[in-house]
Structures are given as C-alpha cells and as structure tokens.
C-alpha cells in the first residue's frame, strides 16, 4: 500500500493472497465491507457458503436475524461436508466475534485442513453508504456497523493465536480491489511427480548398507541414469554406526533433486535436540550424538545444516496422481493430503491401542487391516521380517539395523529390492522373528483373520471379498488336511469345460472347444493323449537351508508335493523328500538355479501313472476312478444301448514292432491340431505318418484300423504301418474332457 487507503483513496499496491487448495477460508469484515463481492470475484460459486443464503434457506428471508442460529447450523454442516470431501470452502459471514470464529477453526481442525483468514478492513462510512444503497439493508442502524468495527479492531492482533495458519489483512477499498487470490498446492501434494520412484525403508544409520542398496538400484553417486527418484520413508538416524554419513548422502540427493524424504520419529527427536529442547537420549539417540561430536571436529557447520534439513521435512507425500502415498508410520485414507497436528502425529508415530506388549512396547493399532483406500501407502516404522502387501499398503522396515535387510520398492513396477545387513548393529527389544504361525512374515495368525467379512488384495483379480462362513470352513479344511500353510504357495485352478454342445445328442463336442480357442485368438492347439496322471504341485528348494530361510520349514524339509486341493500327495514324508530329491537333481542338472537366480521353484505338474499312484492319496484316487468291467453277457444290445458320442481314438504306436510293445513303452508323440472350419479339423503328427489323413479302413490296406467307424462327422485317426494293434483295438480317448466328479485326492479321473 502506497498510502492510507482506509478513507477510500485509490492508490494501493497489488496484493497476492496465497490460499492452500484444501483449506477453510474465513472472510472477516463488518456488514457492508464487500465480503460477498470479494468472494464472487475470486472463488467459484460452489466454493462459497454464505450466512445470508443459509438464513434464507431456513426462514425464506436472508435478513431474518431470529433465524441466525439455525442458519449457522446449516452453514457449519455444509462446510463440514465439503471439507470432508477435500473441497476448498469459503465462509461468507461477518465473523467479527471470536466465538463465531472459534467454531470455524474447530471445524477446520476436525477435518485436518488449514484455516485461513482474509480480513476486509473498510472505513465505517463506506460500509454505511453501501448498506444504504441496498433496499434490504437501508434501515440498518449505524451503531451496528460501529460495533462490528470495534470488534474487528480488537480481533486483528489475535487471529493467529486463535488458530488461523495464515492471516491476510486488506485495508481500504483500493487494496481490496487490487488483491489477487492465488491457489497453491499443499506442501505434501506432489501429484504431478509420476516417478518412477525407488522407495527406501528405514536406514537407521546403516550407511554401508544404504550405499550397497543404492548401487543395486542403479544409482551412481546419488543419481540414477534413468532419472529415477529415491524416496526415503524416514528414520535415517539412530542405532546404526554412521548416522552422519547417511544424512550427508540423503541431504545431498534431496538438494540435487534426485530424492525426496519424509520425516520419521527419530528425525523429529533429533531435530528437537538440535534446537536445544530437552529430550531423552534413548532408542539410539545417544549413539547418534556421539557420532555428531566426532563430526563436529571435521565439519563445524554440519549440525546447523542437519537442523535446517530436519525442520523442512513434512509428514507425508502424495505422489503419482494420487496413486501413491509415502509416509513413515502409515496413514489412513482420510488423512491423505491433509495438514494438521493429528495427521503429522499419525504419520510419524502411528496409532496405538493404549496397551503394551510383553516387551514393554506400545501395541500399535492395525490400521492397515482396515485400509480400503485406492492409493497405495508405503511406510516403515515397525520392523517386520519380510515385506508383504496388506490391503494396498506395504511396510518397508525390514530391520536392517537389527541384522535384517534394507529394503526398497520400485514404483510403479511394485518390485522389491533388498540387501542383507552386514551385521546386527543394535539388539532389538522385541525379536524380529516369532515362533507363532505367521511370525516369520511379521504377522502372526490371528482369529480376527477369519472373523467377519474380509477383503483380500490380489495382483490379478483386485480386491476379493471373503465371507465369514467361507473363511471358517476353509480354515477347518486346511488345518485338518492340508500341508504346512507356510509351504502352500499355490492352488492350481481346475480345467474349465467347453460350452454345452448345440448338436443333438452331444453334451460336449469339439466344435465348441475349437470355437472357443478361435474366439480367443489361439491359432494352434496341441492335443496329447491323456496319461491318467494326477495334478501335483511341487515346491522344491535348493537345500534345507533355503527352505528354512524362505518358508520357515522345519528341519529335514526341503519342500512339498501336494494335490490341487492342498493335501499331501504322499502320506510318507520320506517318499516326498525322495521325489523332491529327484526333481532337485534335474533342476540342478539343467542349471535353472543360476539361470533364474533363485533358491526355490514352484512346479505345477502332473504325476504320471506308476508305482507312485499306489502310495498315499494316489492309491485311493485310483481305486475310486477305476470302473468295473461288464461281462459281455450283461452288456446291453446295440439297439437298447444309449447313443454315445463318437470321438477320435488315440493311437499308441511303437515303430518297428508288429507283435506288441517292447518292455519299456515310450510316451506317444504329441499331435498338433490346428483349428479349421467350424465342422472340420486337420491334424499333423511328428514324425509324419505314411498314412494319408483322409485314409479309411479300406484304403489299399495301408492302415489296419480307423479310430472310429461310427463317426458321423468323418473323423478318422489313421494308424501308420507297422503299428501293433491288439485284438479288439486300443481303448479310445476323447479329445474333450468328460464331466465327472473329481477324485478326493485331487487326481483327474
């Protein structure tokens, strides 16, 4: 302002008023000061909630002062709903009394947004002239305006003490007219940064491990060649051997623009100490202060730079268009992007139940169990043995300072990268690993997991709801019959039948099967003879140590073999280990351990017929699937027999043999079937047969027998010369799966 403009002068320097995007703006001024005009000029109509408008809603008269109480109830309700939705809200009322402002500041705190005051200080004479020009306020007594002016004067100096985070005072009409409102994002709003990011868990002074992890992530001297940005979840200091070195690295990366960092509770405590406040040197702070004392000798200004760095750290960041939230101790969805002491406290310390565990540590409220937000929340603070996604949240504190690992998450790839700790730098009060079921994963089994309706986050199917009765039934079945849950990584899906045939007399027909493949864009289908094997899932580890480290397996266990329902394939553990040993030998010989850079493999396979089928559940499956032979005398006559589906025959061929199969039979050669027109299919074998695909049983004697002489569609499976065919022929095997009840043991019948 170039002069005193309160008398209505026209000279005024332009003012820029910064307004945070998610805030409650309170206009303050006497009646007639131009608040409604100011709001209409600088804000959207939907952003402004006027006391006059609310008074009209409840009384049909905007000037009915008797309805003021109800009008402000409506105003507070509307403003609260907008703030809950994260909308900028402007309150257009006189607000010259401290009591009216107190309710608004409290409303902003309840919704964790910033309260901002904009004061319009206009001379009393100007206010009186404006009211006189309005027909609805022409008779307003002058003493009302004078009272508003007095209350405004008394309030100006105490607005910040009342809780307003920003106060803009505009004096005179010229300054009000020249003012410009500029919206600005919150400090934590970095939605415009889309990454890619490398989010790094709690470092706790482990400088060497941090440098190793950065190198593994591809950083060279704090900078990534592909322009990736590192994001630190806080707790850079305390307990570890080199907190100053960690701070130097992170501060340098943040200053260079190659990293972001949020505050952890340990930085907050160190920052209070550096400001001269009294704090208890516990939980590793004493070790950090000793390291700082040695650092002061080399760099006297280091403490000051660290204090400024910590003072500039915020509670959390909202990144990648709102799809990613990074904080230290986790954050419910209602706090994302908001700013208040409550939000900062939860982001730094989390929420507790008020109880302590057997180690004297606070019991933390499992907020992630109830999280249903769309944004992924990545955090640290509470050490866990391994990382695992829970309802779109991920904890990256894997206890590096306690001898665990230093872990990072690549975003948006959602890839976990970690390095082992060089040693145990600080003995934890509470062990990282627990002997309770699920303790190795940092989440011991809890009855609440199957109580009530649960939501499970999956990679392919998104969120799946599990009803309580289904979870309880699954718990009973799996606890009684399944293998060790720690080894149960995968349950294979069952085969889906093709669509019901539209042809008369057929339940299933190859026409629908090939039509389905064709519709899915499959150009070639490989058909093999069914061996009557059993579905078997084999989890094989390189050795016993790998099984114990990755899955927490007991001594002597190197994996498992289970059915598609999770039941042990063999009753005898020794047989399981013998099978796994042979599989492990094949994997080792093939060099897959090194090729895939892994210590364990999960194989979805089929166990072929043989002696193994007479052991354990295989034997029972075979007995149930076996069908009794019907004597010829009791077989129905051709006329009374029901119509059967004509299917091609799978031919067993042993070249060079005319008397029968050799001692050890070879598996049949796979047949490649290519989908043709809707009613015809062509086939080719490898090696090619001397029989023509169109040959029949009478074709020059080159083929001894066709696969199905009753086929109405002209299917035929020629038999190459020299193939042995026993009397009566080999039993036929359909190309399509029959609808039958699966065996309990999991084998296919």
Image (cartoon, rainbow, N blue to C red):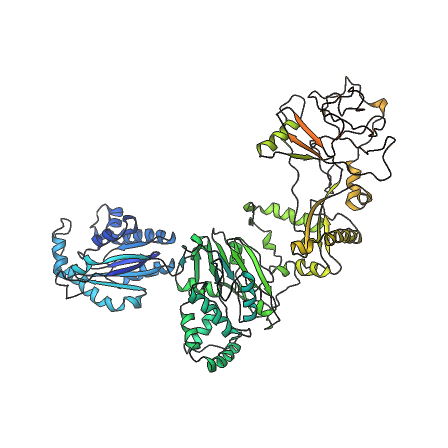
Image location (x, y in percent) of residue 555: 74, 61
Q: Quadrant of the C terminus?
A: top right
Q: Does residue 336 sit above or below 736 in this rendering?
A: below
* Residue 100 in view in this figure: no
Q: Is residue 49 left or right of residue 579?
A: left
From this viewpoint, which residue is outermost toward the top?
A: 639
Q: Quadrant of the N terminus?
A: bottom left
Image location (x, y in percent) of residue 696: 75, 21
The answer to which of 634 and 136 lies nearer the viewer is: 634
Image location (x, y in percent) of residue 35: 21, 55
Q: Is residue 245 left or right of residue 8?
A: right
* Residue 691 in view in this figure: yes
Q: Which residue occupies 30% across, 66% down?
A: 162
Q: Which residue occupies 40% across, 72% down?
A: 308
From this viewpoint, which residue is outermost toward the bottom?
A: 297
What is the count of numbered marks? 0
Image location (x, y in percent) of residue 554: 72, 59
Q: Which residue occupies 14% across, 66% down?
A: 4
The answer to which of 499 and 690 lies nearer the viewer is: 690
Q: Is residue 729 left or right of residue 463?
A: right
The answer to which of 514 and 44 lies nearer the viewer is: 514
Q: Is residue 509 left or right of residue 5?
A: right
The answer to which of 363 and 704 lies nearer the viewer is: 704
């Amino acid at each position: 302002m170039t002069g005193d403009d309160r008398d209505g002068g026209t000279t005024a320097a332009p003012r820029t008023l910064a307004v945070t995007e998610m805030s409650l703006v309170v206009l303050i001024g006497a009646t007639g000061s131009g608040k409604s005009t100011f709001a209409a000029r600088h804000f959207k109509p939907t952003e402004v909630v006027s006391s006059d408008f609310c008074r009209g809603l409840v009384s049909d008269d905007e000037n009915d002062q008797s309805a003021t109480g109800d009008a402000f109830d409506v105003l507070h309700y509307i403003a609260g709903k907008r703030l809950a939705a994260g909308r900028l809200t402007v309150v257009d009322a006189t607000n010259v009394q401290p009591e009216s402002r107190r309710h608004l500041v409290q409303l902003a705190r309840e919704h964790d947004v910033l309260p901002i005051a904009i004061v319009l200080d206009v001379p009393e004479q100007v206010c009186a002239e404006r009211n006189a020009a309005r027909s609805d306020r022409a008779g307003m007594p002058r003493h009302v305006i004078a009272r508003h002016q007095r209350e405004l004067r008394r309030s100006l100096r105490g607005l910040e003490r009342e809780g307003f985070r920003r106060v803009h005072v505009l004096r005179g009409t010229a300054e009000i007219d020249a003012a410009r409102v500029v919206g600005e994002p919150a400090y934590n709003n970095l939605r415009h940064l889309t990454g890619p990011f490398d989010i790094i868990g709690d470092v706790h002074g482990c400088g060497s491990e941090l440098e190793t992890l950065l190198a593994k992530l591809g950083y060279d001297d704090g900078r990534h060649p592909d322009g990736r940005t590192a994001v630190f979840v806080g707790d850079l200091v305390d307990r570890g051997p080199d907190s100053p070195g960690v701070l130097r690295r992170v501060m340098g990366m943040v200053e260079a623009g190659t990293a972001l960092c949020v505050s952890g509770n340990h930085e907050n405590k160190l920052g209070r100490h550096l400001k001269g406040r009294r704090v208890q040197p516990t939980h590793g702070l004493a070790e950090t202060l000793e390291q700082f004392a040695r650092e002061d000798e080399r760099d006297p200004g280091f403490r000051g730079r660290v204090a400024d760095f910590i003072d500039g750290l915020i509670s959390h960041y909202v990144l990648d268009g709102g799809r990613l939230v990074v904080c230290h101790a986790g954050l419910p969805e209602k706090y994302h992007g908001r700013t208040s002491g409550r939000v900062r406290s939860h982001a730094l310390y989390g929420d507790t139940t008020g109880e302590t565990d057997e180690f004297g540590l606070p019991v933390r409220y499992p907020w992630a169990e109830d999280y249903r937000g769309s944004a992924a929340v990545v955090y640290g603070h509470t050490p866990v043995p391994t990382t695992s996604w829970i309802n779109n949240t991920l904890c990256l504190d894997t206890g590096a300072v306690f001898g665990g690992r230093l872990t990072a998450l690549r975003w948006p790839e959602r890839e976990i990268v970690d390095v082992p700790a060089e040693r145990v730098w600080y003995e934890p009060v509470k062990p990282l690993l627990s002997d309770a079921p699920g303790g190795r994963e940092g989440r011991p089994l809890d009855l609440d997991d199957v109580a009530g309706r649960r939501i499970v986050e999956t990679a392919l199917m998104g969120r799946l709801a599990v009803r309580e009765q289904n979870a309880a039934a699954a718990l009973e079945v799996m606890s009684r019959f399944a293998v060790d849950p720690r080894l149960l990584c995968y349950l294979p899906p069952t085969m889906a039948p093709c669509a019901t045939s539209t042809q008369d007399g057929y339940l299933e027909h190859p026409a629908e099967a090939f039509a389905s493949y064709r519709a899915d864009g499959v150009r070639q289908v490989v058909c093999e003879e069914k061996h009557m094997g059993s579905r078997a899932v084999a989890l094989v580890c390189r050795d016993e140590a790998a099984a114990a480290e990755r899955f927490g397996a007991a001594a002597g266990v190197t994996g498992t073999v289970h059915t598609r329902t999770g039941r042990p394939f063999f009753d005898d553990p020794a047989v399981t280990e013998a099978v796994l040993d042979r599989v492990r030998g094949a994997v080792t010989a093939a060099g897959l351990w090194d090729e895939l850079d892994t210590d364990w493999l999960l194989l979805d396979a089929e166990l072929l017929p043989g002696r193994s089928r007479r052991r354990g559940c295989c034997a029972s499956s075979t007995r149930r699937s076996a069908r009794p032979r019907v004597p010829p005398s009791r077989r129905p006559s051709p006329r009374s027999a029901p119509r059967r589906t004509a299917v091609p025959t799978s031919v067993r061929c042993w070249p060079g043999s005319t008397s029968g199969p050799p001692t050890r039979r070879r598996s049949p050669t796979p047949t490649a079937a290519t989908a043709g027109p809707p009613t015809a299919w062509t086939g080719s074998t490898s090696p090619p047969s001397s029989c023509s695909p169109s040959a029949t049983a009478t074709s020059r004697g080159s083929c001894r027998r066709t696969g199905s002489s009753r086929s109405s569609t002209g299917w035929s499976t020629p038999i190459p010369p020299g193939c042995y065919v026993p009397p009566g022929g080999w039993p036929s095997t359909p190309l399509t799966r029959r609808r039958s009840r699966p065996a309990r043991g999991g084998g296919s019948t």
